[in-house]
Amino acid sequence: MTTPLPENEYQFLLDKKVQHITTLFGEFSLPPLDIFPSPSRHYRMRAEFRIWHNKEELYHVMYDPYTQKRIRVDSFPIASKLINLAMQAIVPLLKSSEILRDKLFQIDYLSTLSNQLLITLIYHRKLNEDWLIAAKNLKQNLTNQGIDVHIVGRASNQKICLDQDYIDERLNILNHIYTYRQVENSFTQPNAKINIDMLSWAINVTKEISGDLLELYCGNGNFSIALAQNFNKVLATEIAKASVKAAQYNITVNTINNVKIARLSAEELTDAMKGVRKFKRLDGIDLADYQFSTILVDPPRSGLDKNTLEMIIKYQTIIYISCNPLTLKDNLSFICKTHKIGQLAIFDQFPYTDHLEIGLVLSKKDE
C-alpha cells in the first residue's frame, strides 16, 4: 500500500458499519451491541502479494479489485510490523539470487504476535536442489537480520519445507496464555487482536451455560480450546486434514482434557447425528455420550445450509460467528422462529473495508 491509511477516519468508518448492521437486522429484536474496534494499523497477521519482474527490478504488487490496475507495494501498514520488516529485507536478497527470483510469482506471509514468521515462495517452475540451497541461504540472511523465519517453496504439485510448515501463535486471553499452531496454506484468523476479543467475548457469554458443546467448522480449534473451560465436554468438527492435525496438537499443548476433534463436514455430522450414515472417522467417539446443550457455528461466507439449520435449532443455545452479514440475516430468518438473540457483538476484523465479523448468542424461546 503506497498511500497513507485514513486513520483519522477509522472511528467514522466503524460507526458507519455499525449503523449498517443495525439497519440490516432491524426486523429482529436486538440486544445492546458490544463493539470491538481493531488497531488502526499493523493488525493483519497474514498477507499475499504477487511479484512483479521488470528486468533486474523486483517488487511486491497487488491488484485493484475494480480496475485490475497493478499497484506497487513497498510497505503495507495494515500488515504486522514483522511482515513489513520481512518485505523490506527480502527484496534485495531475492534480486541478488537468480535461482530464487526465477519465475517467482507470489509470496505469502504468515506472522504471529509471538514474532514468528512463515514465508511461502510460489513459482511457475519446478524447484530443485539448487533452489533448496539458495532458500537456506535466504533463511540464514533473514535470521541474521533478527527475523525468526521459516520458509516453504511451492510449485505445481510440489511443496518443499526447509524445516517446518507451521508457526505457533501465543494469545493472552483473559490472562491465560493459549498456544495455537498455524499451518501454512490453512485458515487462521487474520486479525490477532480481534481474535483475542472474539475468544474473550465467547468465554464471557458462555460462563453460565452448562452441559456439553458441539462446534462445527472448528479450524485449528480456535474457539473450542478457549471455551473448553465452560463446558463438561466439547466435540468439534473440521474437514481440512491440516487443520484437524493442528487442532489435535493445540489440544495437547494446552493440556485440554475434555475436547475431541472429528474430521467431518457439517453435512456429514448432520447425517451422523440423524443416524443416516456411519463414519469410520467417528471411531472412538460415541455421540450418545454427549449431552449437548450448546452448538457453536463459524461457517464460511455462504452461511449454513438448510439441513444444518434444521439441526442446530434443536439446541438450547446457539453461538453463531459470522463473516457475512447477508447470509447471517438469511439464516436468522429461520433460526429466530425458535430462538431469540440474547447477545450481539461486532468485531472489526477488517478495518477500512465493508466487512465485519459478528457474534451472536441465541437461546430457545419459551414454549
Image (spheres, rainbow, N blue to C red):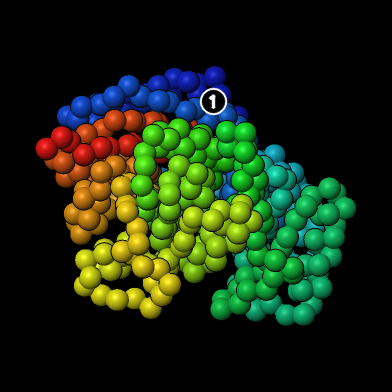
Tell me the residue at 33%/30% (across/down).
343
Picture coordinates of residue 255 (x, y %)? 61, 54
Tell me the residue at 42%/58% (across/down).
236
Disc 1 marks which residue? Answer: 6
Picture coordinates of residue 308 (x, y %)? 24, 57
Mark 1: secondary structure: loop
Tell me the residue at 25%/68% (across/down).
271
- Tell me which amino acid carries mark 1: Pro
Say whether residue 52 is visible.
Answer: no
Residue nearer the viewer, 278 or 102: 278
Tell me the residue at 81%/67% (across/down).
136
Residue furthest right in the image: 144
Say whether residue 29 is visible.
Answer: yes
Picture coordinates of residue 78 (x, y %)? 59, 37
Residue furthest left in the image: 367
Q: Quadrant of the N terminus?
A: top right
| 341 over 89 or under it: above or below | above
Rendered image quadrant of residue 331: top left
| 3 over 127 or under it: above or below | above
Residue nearer the viewer, 73 or 86: 86
